[in-house]
Image (cartoon, rainbow, N blue to C red):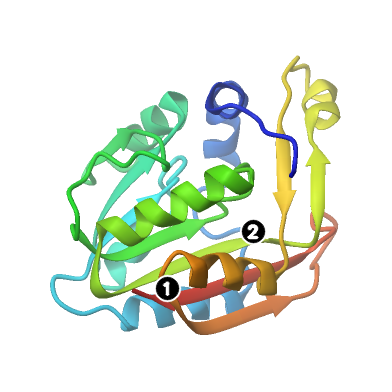
Amino acid sequence: MHEVQSDEQVRSAYDARADEYADAFRCTEPEQPVELAMVNHFAGSLRGQRKVLDAGCGAGRFLPILADLRCEVEGLDLSPGMIRNARADHPSFATQVGALTDLPFEDASFDGYFSWYSTIHSGDQDLQELLREAHRVLRPGGSILVAFQSGDGVQDLSESYRRRGYDLSLLRYLRSPERMAHELTSAGFTLAARLERGPVGDRETENQAVLIATR
């Protein structure tokens, strides 16, 4: 079992860099076209109202992108600092603070669940709870998209924070696409599409993966 970190550790780390993060990534600067094609595929798979939860929305950069794909989107994030930036930069979208393991929504509330690198700080038990919550709030036939760094093991990001002047601890959990597909299947989903690509540029050291599954 991997080392566990608390919601408070994750919240503190992202609150500390919320303004910096929001300024650095205004739109899709870190993404490659092949990943954005998966976002398009996810949006195109939705039915009904096309109501989407951006789960772990951060500063909200994907809210207008999903809206442009004809989704009715709202955001939720653990970090109040991130939500403050999302509300300032994207005031037309509903956003709120909340935990992905305890979503403040009724059963079958959404047609889509969008998780863009929102599982990477969740240990094994939290990931299972997160995916069960995602399954609960999705309508039958709804889709989930999960993007993450591909690999195995746990990375301690504390030193990178210290180099920026922050005395904070943060862990990143790496999982292979096969492992994440297994977790999705165990939570009641059926895998529909899979992407894994190699690192691009100087910022990336791991493969990047995107999975889409249906409820």
Image quadrant in which the C terminus is located = bottom left
* Residue plotted at (58% across, 81% down): 194
Specify the label residue 189 is tagged with: 1
Q: Secondary structure at mark 1?
A: loop
Residue 206 placement (x, y as % from top left):
81, 61
Snapshot quadrant of residue 48: bottom left
Residue underneath mark 2: 30
Say what amino acid the circle numbered 1 marks.
Phe
- The residue closer to the viewer here, 144 or 116, is 144
- The residue closer to the viewer here, 113 or 36, is 113
Left or right: where 154 falls relative to 132: right
Q: Is residue 97 above or below residue 61?
A: above
From mark 2 to mark 1, how far is it between C-alphas?
28 Å
Q: How dense is the environment of label 1, judged by Cα within 10 Å: few (below 14), some, or many (20 and up)?
A: many
Residue 118 appears in the rendering: no
Residue 63 placement (x, y as % from top left):
35, 54
Residue 193 appears in the rendering: yes
The mark nearer the N terminus, 2 or 1, is 2
Left or right: where 200 falls relative to 85: right
* Residue plotted at (62% across, 25% down): 13
Say what amino acid the circle numbered 2 marks.
Pro
Residue contact at pointers 2 and 1, CB within 8 angstroms: no
- The residue closer to the viewer here, 62 or 4, is 4
